[in-house]
Image: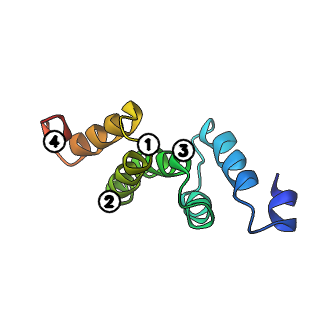
Amino acid sequence: LEEMIEQAPYEPQPKLALASILAFRDETRIDLLQSVVELDPLNAKAHYDLAAAASRQGKCDIADASALRSLELQPGQPNAYGMLGRCALYKGDGVGWFE
């Protein structure tokens, strides 16, 4: 996949695939996912994956913005709501997005 990314740096799918593989190892690179959403800004899954990676790394500003964008693109996506709740808890807001 890394070779494919080098050969086609403007193609989002290999980057998204690599990010998904790395997520299983908790090594997801936020910069890789940010480049995916720049290349494919209407990809709700990419925005959600960025939110999940940022949340795991405690970067809730990025996670919140990405989860909200995912919901704009795919309303009712339950995982994005969960991500917003997770970051609200990290910030010490026990009610947060569940209101």
Mark 3 secondary-structure assignment: helix
Left or right: residue 38 versus residue 60 is right
Instruction: Say what amino acid the circle numbered 2 marks.
Output: Asp
Residue drawn 85% across the image and 58% down it: 4
> Disc 3 or disc 2, which is closer to the eye?
3
Which residue is tagged 2?
61
Give the spatial CA distance, label 1 vs label 3: 9 Å
Residue designated by label 4: 96
Secondary structure of the residue carrying tag 4 is helix
Q: Residues within 10 Å of mark 1 (few under 14, many from 20)?
A: some
* Residue receiving disc 3: 45
| Residue type of the residue flagged with mark 3 | Lys
Q: Give the CA distance from mark 3 to mark 4.
A: 23 Å
Q: Nearer the viewer, mark 1 or mark 2?
A: 1
Nearer the observer: mark 3 or 4; the answer is 3
Asked if the residue under mark 1 is in contact with the one under mark 4, i.e. CB atoms within 8 Å, the reply is no
Q: Earlier in the sequence, mark 1 or mark 2?
A: 2
The kind of residue on which mark 4 rests is Gly
* Residue of label 1: 74
- Tell me residue 42's x, y (percent): 53, 56
